[in-house]
Image (spheres, rainbow, N blue to C red):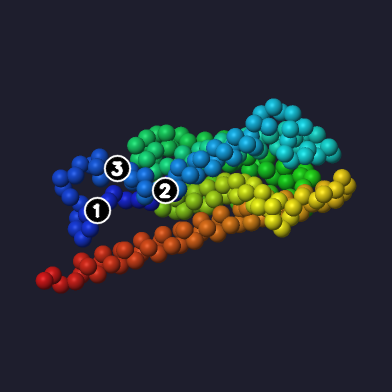
């Protein structure tokens, strides 16, 4: 599973150089052609270091999301959702690493299976349960449920395309799935931005006011948290497809042009 569609590089204006070996033609792109891989891994590492350890204690008092006392199972399922999401986001970073896919295809395949079987599917099912019992308000509940369904659906569609040998379709579906995987990071960033701009924490000790503020903040961060990455992924797919079609047309015109 991967989102890269890079083909072996060719010399401008002509066929591949026959002096290049097969290994050379399959060499991974230079790091500066994929400048987002390193920063993505760094952002994910910082996010995990800041958010995940509090759930490894299995202490409800450490939870960033307050457990719902009406549903005793809410906190354990929330921990499952977060731990499976951690598996998904780590394996997602491995999947979008072109060098790993090309040099270690077995690691790429295993991490892809872990992404779906140990990350997205159990994490998405747990996400639906968390959405049902969430005390963060109706907006957050609807957003979490929608994200969970789309997350699982895109991963399953990508897996199905891969099993059918439709690799191009597989990659497109996995781009969408990866965008949804990263939505939790985007929503956290939006929450911090809101805290310092349009929705600062209220200066009050009133519990109802604090709850209302928390629910509003959660809803405002959650919806764009997954919609924006998904829109960016769709734009990237459309632009990349249009660019590939343009290059194909140019190649046909060059081949059909009369030679001097």
Vertical arrangement, residue 161 with respect to residue 99, above or below: below
Q: Is residue 70 left or right of residue 64?
A: right
| x 47%, y 53%: residue | 172
Find numbered disc 2 in the image and state the secondary structure of the residue it sits on. loop
**Residue 6 locus on image (x, y percent):** 35, 50
Other residues around mark 1 within 10 Å, as few (<14) / some (14–19) / many (≥20): few
**Residue 27's disc number:** 3
- In the rendered image, which quarter contains the N terminus? top left
Evaluate if marks 2 and 3 touch, with contact meaning CB atoms under 8 Å apart.
no
Mark positioned earlier in the residue sequence (2 or 1):
1
Mark positioned earlier in the residue sequence (2 or 3):
3
Q: CA distance from mark 2 to mark 3?
A: 17 Å
Q: CA distance from mark 1 to mark 3?
A: 12 Å
**Residue 82 locus on image (x, y percent):** 65, 37
Q: Is residue 213 left or right of residue 114?
A: right
- Identify residue for label 1: 10
Residue 135 at least partly seen: yes
- Identify residue for label 2: 35
Q: Is residue 139 left or right of residue 257?
A: right
Mark positioned earlier in the residue sequence (1 or 3):
1
Vertical arrangement, residue 248 with respect to residue 119, above or below: below
**Residue 217 locus on image (x, y percent):** 73, 52
Q: CA distance from mark 2 to mark 1?
A: 21 Å
Q: Is residue 228 left or right of residue 158?
A: right
Evaluate if marks 2 and 1 touch, with contact meaning CB atoms under 8 Å apart.
no
Find numbered disc 1 in the image and state the secondary structure of the residue it sits on. loop
Find numbered disc 3 in the image and state the secondary structure of the residue it sits on. loop
């Amino acid at each position: 599973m991967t989102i890269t569609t890079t083909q072996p590089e060719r010399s401008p204006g002509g066929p591949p150089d026959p002096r290049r070996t097969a290994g050379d033609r399959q060499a991974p792109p230079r790091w500066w052609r994929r400048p987002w891989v390193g920063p993505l891994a760094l952002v994910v590492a910082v996010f995990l270091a800041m958010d995940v350890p509090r759930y490894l204690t299995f202490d409800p008092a450490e939870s960033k999301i307050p457990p719902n006392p009406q549903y005793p199972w809410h906190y354990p399922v929330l921990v499952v959702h977060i731990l499976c999401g951690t598996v998904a986001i780590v394996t997602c970073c491995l999947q979008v690493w072109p060098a790993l896919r090309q040099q270690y295809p077995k690691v790429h395949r295993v991490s892809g299976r872990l992404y779906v079987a140990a990350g997205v599917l159990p994490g998405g099912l747990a996400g639906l349960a968390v959405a049902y019992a969430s005390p963060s308000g109706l907006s957050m509940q609807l957003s979490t449920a929608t994200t969970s369904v789309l997350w699982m659906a895109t991963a399953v569609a990508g897996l199905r395309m891969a099993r059918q040998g439709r690799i191009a379709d597989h990659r497109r579906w996995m781009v969408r799935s990866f965008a949804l995987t990263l939505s939790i990071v985007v929503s956290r960033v939006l929450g911090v931005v809101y805290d310092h701009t349009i929705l600062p924490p209220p200066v009050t000790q009133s519990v109802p006011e604090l709850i209302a503020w928390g629910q509003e903040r959660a809803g405002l961060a959650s919806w764009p948290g997954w919609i924006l990455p998904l829109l960016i992924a769709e734009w990237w797919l459309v632009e990349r497809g249009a660019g590939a079609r343009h290059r194909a047309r140019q190649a046909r015109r060059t081949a059909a042009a009369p030679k001097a």
